[in-house]
Image (cartoon, helix red, strand yellow):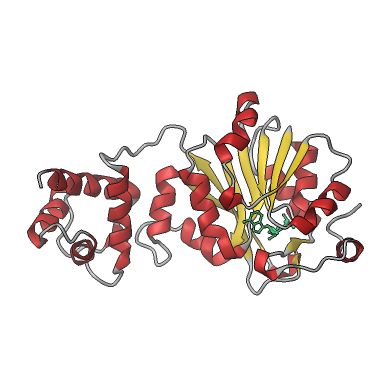
């Protein structure tokens, strides 16, 4: 069965009396070489288990099951579960669960997979919920080897941007705290059924095994990043003033100076290492209060 063949996809959907559900971001891949490339590039170790989010009719799942030890796939749409039993019936290394990834206890689900070896994430993510899913994967603290996701090209540009560039934002800095992101390749809108309005990019995030940045207080680090980008056209000092109302202008200025920055610097110039140092300086002042 060729799950990338448009006719086959339409036949399967008709056979199970289904239509593509826009509210779940259902744009299925129809280019086999792209699906194979994602499955191959998602991690180095063939003996890894893979968490897939949103298997759809099983197009990527099929390739992952063929080249990885095990796959566990979370699909929100109940209507697709019988389809997945049909399309993936030949594999005994795939487990499909009808669940919303945002509601899933990933630690409990993946504990038996981590016991056996490495686990990576691989997914063609639904556009409507890309950032919340990514943040859940990062914040859950599980030691994934890699997180490989296909996302809107514009979002990929933001996630992989360099400090100081126009695409650099809070999410870029936060992602850099957890790992190193690289763009793998672009996938034009025409490679999906139905075709979305925008192109996609596959990115791969290698999570830090040991975090290179150790802030005094993680919550203050995230607060600093959020405040710095909250008022993008303002200087860092003014933006932090709005985000840390309990600190005086002078205290914020002294924290910025203590990190060796000019008083007029803007937040988007700072990389995650510099944000960590700044948040520590702010933290020390906050502790004296
Ligand atoms: N993996 C398939 C492919 O590449 O052709 C389908 C990808 S499609 C872009 C996104 C899939 O995620 C859909 O099957 C959709 O039903 C599913 N999905 C959407 N929201 C979800 C959620 N919160 N949890 C789990 N699956 C979700």
- In the image, is 113 to the left or to the right of 85? left
Q: Nearer the viewer, residue 43 or 141?
A: 141
Outermost residue, top side: 116
Image spot of residue 16 (x, y percent): 88, 61
Ligand 1 quadrant assignment: bottom right
- In the image, is 279 to the left or to the right of 9? left
Task: Write down the quadrant of residue 63 in the picture.
Answer: top right
Q: Is residue 145 visible?
A: no
Task: Write down the quadrant of residue 6 in the picture.
Answer: bottom right
Residue 170 vs 105, above or below: the answer is: below
At 29% from the left and 69% from the top, the residue drawn is 231
Q: Nearer the viewer, residue 105 or 158?
A: 105
Q: Is residue 164 visible?
A: yes
**Total label count?**
0
Image spot of residue 257 (x, y percent): 13, 53
- In the image, is 161 to the left or to the right of 76? left
- In the image, is 40 to the left or to the right of 246? right
Image spot of residue 245 (x, y percent): 18, 61
Image spot of residue 70 (x, y percent): 73, 35
Residue 189 vs 94, above or below: the answer is: below
Outermost residue, left side: 250
At 53% from the left and 66% from the top, the residue drawn is 154
At 20% from the left and 59% from the top, the residue drawn is 244
Residue 137 vs 185, above or below: the answer is: above
At 47% from the left and 33% from the top, the residue drawn is 209
């Amino acid at each position: 069965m060729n799950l990338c063949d448009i006719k086959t996809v339409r036949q399967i959907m008709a056979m199970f009396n289904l239509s593509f559900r826009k509210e779940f971001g259902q744009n299925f891949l129809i280019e086999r070489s792209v699906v194979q490339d994602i499955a191959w590039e998602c991690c180095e170790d063939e003996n890894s288990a893979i968490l897939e989010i949103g298997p759809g009719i099983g197009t990527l799942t099929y390739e992952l099951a063929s080249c990885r030890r095990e796959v566990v796939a979370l699909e929100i749409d109940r209507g697709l579960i019988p389809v997945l039993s049909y399309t993936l019936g030949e594999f005994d290394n795939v487990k499909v669960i009808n669940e919303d990834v945002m509601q899933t206890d990933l630690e409990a689900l993946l504990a038996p997979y981590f016991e056996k070896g490495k686990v990576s994430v691989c997914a063609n993510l639904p556009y409507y919920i890309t950032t919340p899913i990514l943040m859940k994967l990062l914040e859950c603290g599980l030691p994934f080897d890699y997180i490989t996701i296909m996302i809107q090209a514009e979002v990929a540009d933001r996630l992989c941007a360099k400090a100081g560039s126009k695409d650099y934002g809070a999410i870029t800095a936060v992602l850099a705290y957890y790992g190193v992101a690289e763009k793998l390749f672009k996938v034009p809108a025409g490679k999906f059924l139905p075709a979305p309005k925008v192109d996609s990019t596959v990115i791969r995030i290698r999570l830090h095994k040991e975090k290179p940045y150790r802030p005094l207080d993680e919550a203050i680090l995230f607060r600093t990043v959020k405040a710095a980008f909250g008022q993008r056209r303002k200087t860092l000092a003014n933006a932090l003033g709005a985000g840390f109302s309990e600190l005086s202008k002078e205290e914020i200025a002294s924290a910025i100076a203590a990190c060796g920055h000019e008083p007029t610097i803007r937040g988007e110039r700072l990389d995650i290492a510099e944000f960590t140092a700044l948040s520590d300086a702010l933290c020390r002042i906050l502790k004296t209060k």
